[in-house]
Every structure is written in structure tokens, then in C-alpha cells.
Amino acid sequence: MSPSRPQPRPGVLAIDAYVPGKSEAPGAAKVFKLSSNESPHGPSPKAIAAYNAVGKHLEDYPDGASTDLRAAIGRTFGLDPDRIVCGAGSDDLLNLLARAYLADGDEAIYTTHGFLVYPIATMGAGAKPVVAPETNYTADVDAILARVTPRTKMVFLANPNNPTGTYVPFDEVKRLHKGLPAHVLLVIDAAYAEYVRRNDYEAGIELVATTDNTVMCRTFSKIYGLAGLRIGWMYGPAHVVDAVNRIRGPFNVNIAAIAASVAALEDSAHQEMARQHNLKWLPWVAEEIGKLGLQVTPSVANFVLIHFPATKGRTAGDANDFLMKRGLILRQVGAYKLPNALRMTIGSEEANRLVVKALADFLGQPA
Ligand SMILES: Cc1ncc(COP(=O)(O)O)c(C=O)c1O
């Protein structure tokens, strides 16, 4: 018997929809949103000016090939613009890659606390997400390789990972790539690359340039402060770029996003200011929260993962409620299999100090 109403493809209704970070703290006089790893500095003033300028021509379709933006990315990173695709955030590109390379019955591997868009994109494409365990909240190359089967078509690696903030050194990423069959696509999601200052880190450009089965995704949502415009890009082999271009929306990137991100790329001083702020406050926040007796996973990104005990009155949920009352919105990460932790974006000096003070008060009160 045929169903009485349209049925989504298998797997779709098994997806837990992505729940974004909260942005409201009812009752609080002043709110600090530290739940979505946005930039406390906002975008470059030059990006805002470029955004405002395109408002005069909203009747025009964008350039569907994002030519100016790909050229600007090419200049900035020393890449061939023909091997770049722009998307409505890197989410768009992650989904396009899944749609282009996964079919029913295929498998895509990601890690236990990996970014939640990976299983969503995988299941949305009809494939099966396979979870590889992490070691010390960090992707484990051997565990990933051990889960490769004849059905594996993709491996998603967030480097650095959200929500843990940990990273995989370049030698390990190369070892991962070497261990994968040639037909498996390695997707390196480097959304936070601009924040990382480690000699043994490489965002993925070299592997993409030298192999046929690696793609790197990047975003303007983080250090560039353009999350609201939804703009990201990927760099990949010509054959992957060709496949993605065939299925992406013909105008998937809007004119405001193109104009603002071109201007943002050109304002290296603004980026450097944001990076220096993070380099100063990331260790400060981690150290001060550590001094309170809470464990903080070492992070190289613009956020920290704070672990709480399971003791009643001291849990991550209790801390979250306490912080919320003060207008400090962190991210509960139960959906990332981290029910005893909160993720905090590095905010302004004022926000960072308020969180540390609030956590001290929270821990100082009777449980
Ligand atoms: C690891 C990771 N990848 C991708 C994204 C998505 O970024 P975008 O805003 O470009 O879609 C995020 C956003 O939080 C992220 O944390």
C-alpha cells in the first residue's frame, strides 16, 4: 500500500536538528552572547561599508560564480581561484560535499565530539555517520582509520574541532590521509584556522594542493565577524570543485556577503587585532577558570570547553542557569556527548572577566 502522505527519504527523520546557541537571557540587564563562537569585535568597518554600499542595488542577482571573492581569496592565500567554491557559510559547502559524494548505504566517519553538521549532512544524503572515538577530546587518527570499511566515502575532520578546541598536528593529518583509500574524500574543516598559532598546525592547503582526495572548508563567520551574512569557501581538487559546482545553488552566495568578505579579507589589521585579542584572553580565561578548580580542555581556537562535576548543585546545567541569570550565555554541549561541560566563546575583556567572577561565585555558594 502506498503511504498516505509524502515520505522524506530514509534517514531524514532520524536526524536531530541542529540547535543553535542561545541568544537571550531573560531578565538580565546586559547580555553577553558567548554561545556561538562569534567575534566580539564584529566585522571590519571596511566590510560594513561595502555591505552598506550594495544595498543600493538589491534588484541585481549576485555573480553566481563569486568571481571577485574567489580572486580575493586566491590573492590572500596564494591559491588558484579556479579551485575555490564559495558557499552560504561553510555549512552549505559541507552539505554540498555530502550530497555530491554520499549515497544510500555509504558511510562517512567523524569523531565523537565532532561538529554536529557532519552527521546531519551525512544522514541528509542518505548515508550512515560512523563515529570514531577521540583520545583526550582530540581526533584519533588510528581510531578513524580503524573504522574505514569498503562503504566509507568521506572522513570529516574539524581542525581545530568545535566544541573541544583541540587540534591534530599536520604530521598526523598527513598520516590520516595516507591511511585512507584513494577514493575516500578527506574533508578538513578549518573554520577556526585563523586563530591557531602552533608551528605544527597546517589548515589543509598543502594537502589539498598535493593530493586528489582532500578538501578544505573555511568560513568568514569567525575571525572575520560575518556570521550573519553566511559566507564560507572551500579549496579542493579541480574534479571536486567541478562536482560541487554542478549541484550548488546557482546564486548560493548573496551580493552583500561577497562585497563584505572581499573587504574583510583586505583589512588584515582588523584580523590581526582580533587574533591578538584572542591570543591574550584565551590563555587568561583558561588559566583563571582552571584556578577555580574546573578542568578546561586546552584550546587553540576562540573558545574553551569547561568541565563540571556531576555533583548536584555543581553541574554544567546548574552553572549554565547561574550564568544565564547574569546575562552570560554559554553553550550547553550535551548534543556533542559532553553533558558535563559548557563551551565559552572568548568574548570582550568585560565578558571574560564577568564569566570568571560568576563561576567563582557559583562555586563559592553552597552546592
Ligand atoms: C567546526 C565548524 N565548522 C563549520 C562551522 C560553520 O560555519 P559557517 O558559519 O561558515 O557555516 C562552524 C560554526 O560554528 C564550526 O564550528
Image (tube, rainbow, N blue to C red):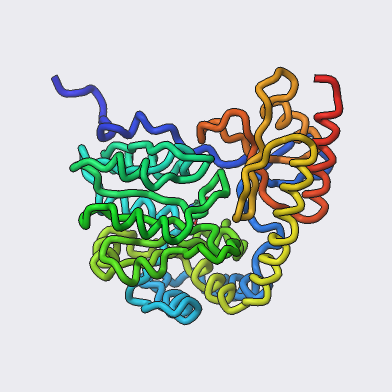
Residue for point 67% across, 44% down: 344
Quarter of the figure that contains the N terminus: top left
Instruction: Indicate left or right for 284 with 199 as reference.
Output: right
- Residue 278: x, y in percent? 69, 60
- Residue 78: x, y in percent? 44, 80
Residue 163 higher or lower than 245, as above or below: above
| Quadrant hosting residue 35 | top right
Q: Nearer the viewer, residue 42 or 196?
A: 196
Residue for point 35% across, 56% down: 175
Residue for point 80% across, 55% down: 349
Q: Nearer the viewer, residue 65 or 38?
A: 38
Does the rendering let one see residue 196? yes
- Residue 42: x, y in percent? 68, 62
**In the rendered picture of this protein, how many numbered marks are placed on residues?**
0
Quarter of the figure that contains the C terminus: top right
- Residue 133: x, y in percent? 42, 36
Q: Nearer the viewer, residue 93 or 255?
A: 93
Residue for point 47% across, 76% down: 77
